[in-house]
Image: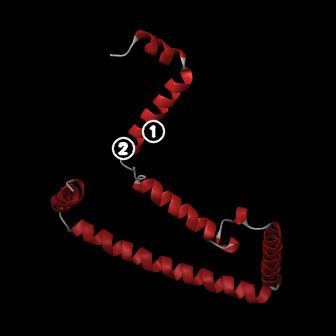
Amino acid sequence: MSHPTEHNRARHNPESQEARLERLIHGVLREQPPLRAPASLETRVLAALELEALPWWRKGFAQWPLGARAAMFAALLLVSKLTLDVVMWVFSSPTPVSQTVESTISRAKSTAGVFTSLLQVFQSLLNVIPGHWITLALVFAAGMYFMLFVLGATAYRTLYLNK
């Protein structure tokens, strides 16, 4: 057992207590196993490093140099001006455009006629089929859809959630 004066001397000497505490903490920390970063953190850090390694033109527009952004803006203005000029030129000459519009309208009318004929055929078929058959077919289709949903949910639980 230590002598009371020795204990008082150690208590009054804060440097030796701090040094002892530091050695104790250092020893405990040295005995701890090294920790590995979580996989999600590792993936995010690697993705950020890959993004930094990309050249400027493969990054987002906000990360481009100011000169490149200005050049892109000028090119887009030029393309929009040329597009507007072409549209104005196409609609300024009445003869070719009016013929194109007329042929488009006639094709749309013929397509609408085909759809009208198909609709009349389906309507006549529905008038021939008894109503309870249609009801049974709809109930059967709903049951099959429900069965597909149940099978899909079961497969998902079996294959992915029970790993």
Give x and y (percent) for residue 50.
56, 68
User: As drawn, which residue projects farthest toward the top?
Assistant: 4
Residue 18's place in the image compared with 48, above or below, is above
The color scheme shown is secondary structure
Quadrant in the picture for residue 60: bottom right
Q: Pick the residue in front: 24 or 60.
A: 24
Give x and y (percent) for residue 127.
25, 66
Residue shown at 32%/75% (left/top)? Answer: 121
The quarter of the rendered structure image containing the C terminus is bottom left
**Kind of residue sitting beneath label 1:** His
Marked residue nearer the N-terminal end (1 or 2):
1
| Residue under pointer 1 | 26
Quadrant in the picture for residue 72: bottom right
Residue 91 left/right relative to 33: right
**Kind of residue sitting beneath label 2:** Glu
- Secondary structure under badge 2? helix
Residue shown at 63%/86% (left/top)? Answer: 103
Q: Which mark is residue 31?
A: 2
Residue shown at 44%/14% (left/top)? Answer: 7
